[in-house]
Amino acid sequence: MKRFFLLTLLICLGAFSTFAQKGTKERIKVHSKALEGNLIGDPADRDVTVYLPPSYASNPDKRFPVLYMLHGFTDTDSQWFGWEKHWINLQDVIEQSLAEGLSKEMIVVMPNAYNRFKGSMYANSVTIGDWETFVTQELVRYVDANYRTIPTKESRGLAGHSMGGYGTLRLGMKNSEVYSAIYALSPCCMDGGASTNPELMKKLETLTPDQLQATSFFEIAALATSAAFAPNPKNPPLYLDLPAKNGEARQDVINKIIANRTLNFVDQYILNLKKLKAIAIDAGLQDRGISEATKNLHEVLDSYQIPHFYESYEGDHLNRIAERIRIKALPFFSENLVFQAPTKSEIIENGGKGSFPAVMTSATSFPTHTIFQPQDLSKFGNKNKLPIIAWGNGACFDSPWEHVNFLNEVASHGFLVIAIGTMPKQTDVRSKSHKLLDAIDWAIAQNADPNSPYFQKLDTQKIAVSGMSCGGLQTLEVAGDPRITTVGVFNSGVLGNGGGMPGMPQVTKAKLNEIKVPTLYLLGGKSDIAYGNGMDDFERINHVPVFVGNLEVGHGGTYGQPYGGEFARVATAWYKWQLKGDQEAGKLFSGKTPGLAKSEGWVVEKKNMD
């Protein structure tokens, strides 16, 4: 009897364990500007299934890594996640893996890539739209903004099956700054040519969009391939070129298709692949063609000495995929993604020279940024509140490593400084201007949250946006936001042609007209590569108070000097004046002969200041 009771108890506990692992799923719409205007007329509002792990609801303070999953050709997110019956139910697979202790909790996101051609190939063409940008940028931004993610590449993975495996390799090697780990299951389309079968081509040449649903697998696959890799905006109604026309092979079209086979372009992205923390590929031995191509990719990676996991196993294209995800892919990401948001704090230069010794830290509620703040927040509130400064980094780095002395010194004078990016130093990721506005949004929300350490301690009516070099361009890109009190542009200025290197904000001189508040330019003199651009900005700004100070130190400024050097002294005085009403600090910039003009080495000009 006792033995029976124990057995029953164990069974019940096992059942309870499995039940406890239940998460939730939701199907949402995400609008994509990158898919707008695609010639085939597919909607830019895309279905996306989001799986939230069991403790997402029960632990509202916890943040999670994200695994982006890509489904295969002719499949949908709805099929994969059990919204309709299919050969796989990914939610069940995830929860079985959790219940067996094989994997950890993570958010799993799958966009619906089913289109008129029954599959996008996760490519970029005018015919089907820019799926690369949608998946790697727009969808990632949406998920990070609307769910409790750990929004760093270290906590972001990409995986997929068949066409999704191809997409995983294609997008993963092109976007190593977005994902840290990738797993391709039975990836298709890695080698081979393009079919020029006369009968097939003749039939495809006559098809209209209304007839696509009735096509066979091989017919629609040929069309989808051409739509993705051989688009032609002058060839309605399908807006694509086929590999043959009128019975003759078209080598130019064939070349376009072949160029997009994984094994034909992988060599171009070896350096990106080396930036990934972990890579995995597998395929069933009975998955004809795909098994051989996957082995070839494994050999290519080996030849470049790129560490990776590779396995071929007994199975075909479908029969063991659920098992592989459960026992291989999910454990792979559980091992290689970062599951803890950074919370490290560090004292810089004994806290700075100001009256409020500062600390460099991060917040679990905002892990994409680094915060510089007074160590003792109890001194703030009521009438003594912390003004807010959002900061963009040189080279648009997603890390403020170049500016820690400067930013810490400013914070020690009673400011909350929120810098784009994380510490420690990293240089392989570029940030976007919206992260400055994200900082403002977060600070305002924290000030209103009774559970926040910043509750009613921040002055949300006194906000500065500033940045150095590329970060200065980010500043100018958002300077028209009505919440901003003052702007600081350091070692920067709009390029005369309004362009710039890829990854830089593409602002033009017209953007200067959107500035509505007093503006400070600090430049490194004529040896500063931004000197001409910055001085030209100054000459053009005639509608708001503007001050420019030049110190002959070059483009690097004085940020890395002890306590941020002269740039920190001057910037702090400006912030004290503009954000705290400190008239004594304002004397450095105001009057017939501004105080800064009397400081050694400084050359100043001002307009509309008095």
Image (cartoon, rainbow, N blue to C red):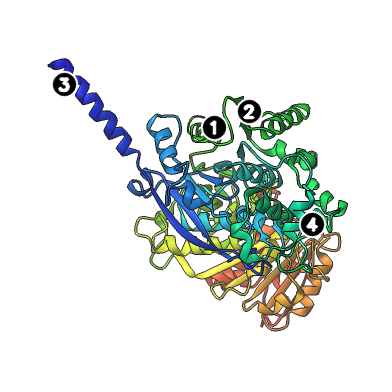
- Label located before the other in sequence (3 or 2): 3
- Label located before the other in sequence (4 or 2): 2
Q: Nearer the viewer, residue 391 or 315?
A: 315
Q: Is residue 217 above or below residue 461?
A: above
Badge 4: how crowded within 10 Å, few (<14), some, or many (20+)?
many
Query: Residue 261 in the image: x percent, y percent?
Result: 75, 43
Badge 2 is on which residue?
309
Distance from disc 4 to disc 3, alpha carbons, whole Å, reads 76 Å
Query: Residue 89 in the image: x percent, y percent?
Result: 44, 43
Disc 3 to disc 2: CB gap under 8 Å: no
Badge 2: how crowded within 10 Å, few (<14), some, or many (20+)?
few
Image quadrant where one finds the N terminus: top left
The amino acid type of the residue labelled 2 equals Phe
Distance from disc 4 to disc 2, alpha carbons, whole Å, reads 44 Å
On residue 5, which mark appears? 3
Badge 1 is on which residue?
332
Distance from disc 3 to disc 1, alpha carbons, whole Å, reads 38 Å
Badge 4 is on which residue?
555
Distance from disc 3 to disc 2, alpha carbons, whole Å, reads 45 Å
Q: Is residue 107 above or below residue 490?
A: above
Q: Which secondary structure lies at badge 2?
A: strand
Q: Which secondary structure lies at badge 3?
A: helix
Q: Nearer the viewer, residue 407 or 222?
A: 222
Image quadrant where one finds the C terminus: bottom right
User: Which of the 4 image quadrants contains residue 262?
Assistant: top right
Disc 1 to disc 2: CB gap under 8 Å: yes
Q: Which secondary structure lies at badge 4?
A: loop
Badge 3: how crowded within 10 Å, few (<14), some, or many (20+)?
few
